[in-house]
Amino acid sequence: MKKRMLGALILVVIGISAALGPGASPNDQVLFLIDKKEIARLPPGVLSEFSGLEELRGSWLVEASAGRLRSILCAGVRIEILDIHPVGKSYFLVFTPQAGDAADLAAMGEVKSLDSETVLFLTDGREARELLPDRFAIKRLTRDHPQPVTAFGTASSESDRRFGVLRPTAFDPIISGLVDLVSGPSWAKTVRDLQGFRTRYANTAACEAAASYLAEAFSRLGFTAESDYFTFSANGYSTRNIIATQPGKTRPDLVVLIGAHFDSYSTAAATNAPGADDNASGTAAVLEIARVLSGTSFDFTLKFVCFSAEEWGLYGSKHYAAEAKNRGEKILAVLNLDMIAYTDRLPEDLDLVVNASSEWLFNRYAICAALYTPLELLKIVNPNLKYSDHSPFWDQGYSAVLGIEDAGVPNPYYHKTTDVFETLNMDFATSVTKLTLAVAAGLAQPIIR
């Protein structure tokens, strides 16, 4: 990226100067990419004027005023200009891990490569989900809640001040007993029920019916299920997240969130998207964890959230995370489950995707795996893997982890009409559910009577 930046520097300054010609303003926003090493060279106080949109593995996607940008370019700080007039445009991050992916996307619209596995895709106002082939994972780029730009991620630990309320992880007979209550057949029934809606594509009546099913399922467990409505896409589609809350007894203001998206997608999304692995499997795990934990008291509040419109660009979790930040919700941890039931080999491991400030959650999983269930784990620290519902919580500064069967998604039925229950491994999914329950219960801290 450095060579590309150096070669473009003079043209960039000319381009910005042209943009600041008659009728333009130094306050006009510019979208650009900046290497984290370059961030460290910035003059004091400049970062506070940047709006961080997305953190990538070695760089940041940022907006700043054209006036400010021209001054730092003249100071010799290298950046790559992506758009001199980005406001009002529809941008999506697209995951492109395979050779040729970026070239394929370029045939469908305007593409700007950000790194070896991420491109920025500009649409004409339509949704990327409606334009791109089913194999691509996407995330809508939004400007509503900019992030603080940092040179390098800050690792966190349970000794940090904000986690001072958490007890050290140790064997707990209460948690062990709860783990034993997890039922594979109960999990399987929910997967089959969700598959039975034929599709859960977020702009369909079937998705709304699936949301009602989930609300009723939580109600049968004794929860008051909340429907969190939101609109998405230029067409103004409406859908809802389903939220069940189990208030904590000691510190109800502190929250442990267990979540998964329930919407689905396929090559025939409007009529046939069974989505058994993606992501009835994770949704069923959330319901099963809620079923088991509902009869136990905890220090902290547990929230069980089923997100919608994930497949369209993480709209449901973006909405929830932004609202949580706005109301000052103190979320200790987000445990996001997405595709936890397909095994391409045995024994299968559980991939756990974290960013630097969420690594402590992997440590929690590793300790609980040793204590309660013999599940192999793979740690992946990569802020580029942002195409599931953990990512919007990272954006808001919360610690979040993605649990997934394989981050590379080798499942041959992914986003296909053949993603059905018969392709899943119930034993593996049950083990993931048990482990996530143990982590969630440990974080929320069961009250000993």
Image: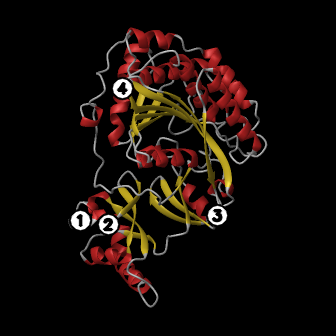
Q: Which residue is mark 4?
A: 364
The nearer-to-camera label among 1 and 4 is 1
Report the residue at 28% width, 41% height from top. Answer: 155
SS at badge 1: loop
Give the image quarter of residue 440: top left
Q: Is residue 37 left or right of residue 127?
A: left
The residue under label 4 is which amino acid type? Arg
Q: Position of residue 294 (x, y in %)?
A: 53, 19
> In the rendered structure, which disc, 3 or 1, sits on the residue that comes first in sequence?
1
Label 1 close to label 2 by CB (< 8 Å) = yes
Q: Which residue is mark 3?
A: 108
Q: Is residue 58 left or right of residue 427?
A: left
Q: Residues within 10 Å of mark 1 (few under 14, many from 20)?
A: few
> In the rendered structure, which disc, 2 or 3, sits on the residue that comes first in sequence?
2
Label 2 close to label 4 by CB (< 8 Å) = no
**Could you give the CA–CA distance between mark 2 and mark 4, rounded to whole angstroms?**
36 Å
Q: Which residue is mark 2?
A: 49
The residue under label 2 is which amino acid type? Glu
